[in-house]
Image (cartoon, rainbow, N blue to C red):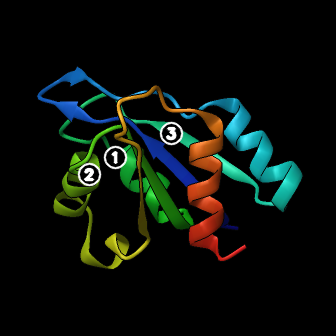
Amino acid sequence: MKTPLATITGAVSSLRQLGDRMSPESRDDLLKQYGLDTDYMRIRAYPFPQSVHDFVASHERVYVVEQNRDAQMQSLLKLDLPAAETTKLRSVLHFNGLPMDAESVTGAVVEQEGL
């Protein structure tokens, strides 16, 4: 059975991790306030291991949460995943110079879910 929502966080440059974790508060807010149960995966390396492909395949929608303007991780995922899987990817970008907070992530996901 597929879990409807998933998040992937992190941006990689070569093998060096540049991204941040999605806060547990964001996931808790989505569940408590909106009834959205989420899974989470933090990508730590490129090229992507098979577990990344399996994670995307097992979800209906995947939010790629990144703390940059250019959506680098989502771009890499689109290059690496089968074309049918790339339609599941949705972007949550945070690039205003401040640390990423739970409210920003939660708000972006809720907006894209149409809630």
> In the picture shown, does residue 14 fall above or below 39?
above
Nearest to viewer (mark 1 / mark 3): 3
Is tag 1's residue or tag 3's residue first in the polypeptide sequence?
3
Residue marked by disc 1 = 50
Residue 28 figure quarter: top right
| Disc 1 crowd, CA 10 A, few/some/many (<14, 14-19, 20+) | few
Residue matched to label 2 = 71
Residue nearest the viewer, comparing 97 with 40: 97
Above or below residue 84? Residue 58 is above
Q: Position of residue 24 (x, y in %)?
A: 69, 31
Helix, strand or loop at label 2? It is: loop
CB contact under 8 Å: marks 1 and 2:
no
In contact (CB < 8 Å): disc 1 and disc 3: no
Left or right: residue 70 compared with residue 55? left
Q: CA distance from mark 3 to mark 2?
A: 17 Å
What's the amino acid at mark 1? Gln
- For residue 89, what is the image quadrant? bottom left
- At 56% from the left and 64% from the top, the residue drawn is 59
Q: Which residue is mark 3?
A: 41
Q: Position of residue 101 (x, y in %)?
A: 58, 33
Dot in front, 1 or 2: 2
The single residue placed furthest to the top in the displayed view is 16
Rounded to the nearest angstrom, the CA distance separating label 1 from label 3 is: 13 Å
Closer to the chain start, of discs 1 and 2, is: 1
Q: Amino acid at mark 3?
A: Met
* Residue 108: percent from left, percent from top: 56, 57
Q: Earlier in the sequence, mark 3 or mark 2?
A: 3
- Amino acid type of the residue that numbered disc 2 sits on in the rendered structure: Ala
